[in-house]
Amino acid sequence: MSQHIRDALDKLDAAIAADPQKARAKHAGATAALAGGLKFTVTGPHGEKLETDMAKGVGGEASGPSPGWALRAALASCTGTVIALRAAKLGLVLDRLEVNVDSDGDLRGMIGSDDTVSAALTGLRMRVAIDAKNASRGELEELVRWADAHSPVACTLRAAMPVSVSVG
């Protein structure tokens, strides 16, 4: 499988080298529609679907993951994907790869009980469990650090860019 990934990356690298504009992408949107209570159905243009809900303590039904969990899941899976991509490019065969992301937060910001408290997730922590027979611990640590620096979700979260909002 890693050879298939490496071949795909080599082909993509060659296409981008020949025409750097091919590296530019506009990513598909996600549309969240209220399904009732605090439950949302999030869909994408190619049949993607995710259902979120909130915990019972804030009035949800806990019928699905919260949006904050989906963000942590995105960070974990994106970074894991970049680790796997880079490992394939380097010829490393991963025996185990698990990425765990957790965070802290203060509900007062989200529910508006204290406007001096941010609704932001804080203290994002990512732990990576990784093993490969053909790599040293140092090589694996370098791989994880490289992937963390190249994970689109991690980079986006660190950039803290403004989000434009329009109401229509």
Image (cartoon, rainbow, N blue to C red):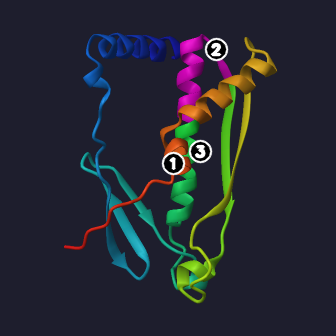
Which of the two residues, 47 or 116, is positioned nearer the viewer here? 116
| Mark 3–mark 1 distance (CA, rounded to whole Å) | 17 Å
Q: Which numbered disc, 3 or 1, marks the residue closer to the eye?
A: 1
Q: Amino acid at mark 1?
A: Ala
| Mark 3–mark 2 distance (CA, rounded to whole Å) | 20 Å
* Secondary structure of the residue carrying numbered label 1: helix
Tally the marks.
3
Q: Which residue carries the number 3 mark?
A: 76
* Mark drawn on residue 159: 1
* Secondary structure of the residue carrying numbered label 3: helix
Q: Earlier in the sequence, mark 3 or mark 2?
A: 3
Which of the two residues, 127 or 154, is positioned nearer the viewer here? 154
Q: State whether residue 65 appears in this view.
A: no
Residue 110's quadrant in the figure? bottom right
Placement of 90 over or under 112, stated as above or below: above
Q: Which residue carries the number 2 mark?
A: 92
Q: Earlier in the sequence, mark 2 or mark 1?
A: 2
Give how far across and how far down residue 105 sits, in percent.
Answer: 66, 69
Placement of 69 over or under 152, stated as above or below: below
The residue drawn where x is 48% and y is 13% is 6
Q: Is residue 104 left or right of residue 43?
A: right
Placement of 64 over or under 127, stated as above or below: below
Q: Is residue 160 left or right of residue 21?
A: right
**Type of secondary structure dominating the magenta stretch:** helix
Placement of 55 over or under 13, stated as above or below: below
Q: Is residue 45 left or right of residue 57?
A: left
| Mark 2–mark 1 distance (CA, rounded to whole Å) | 30 Å
Q: State whether residue 109 appears in this view.
A: yes
The residue drawn where x is 66% and y is 24% is 143
Which residue range is magenta in the image? 80-94
**Is residue 2 part of the magenta span, yes or no?**
no
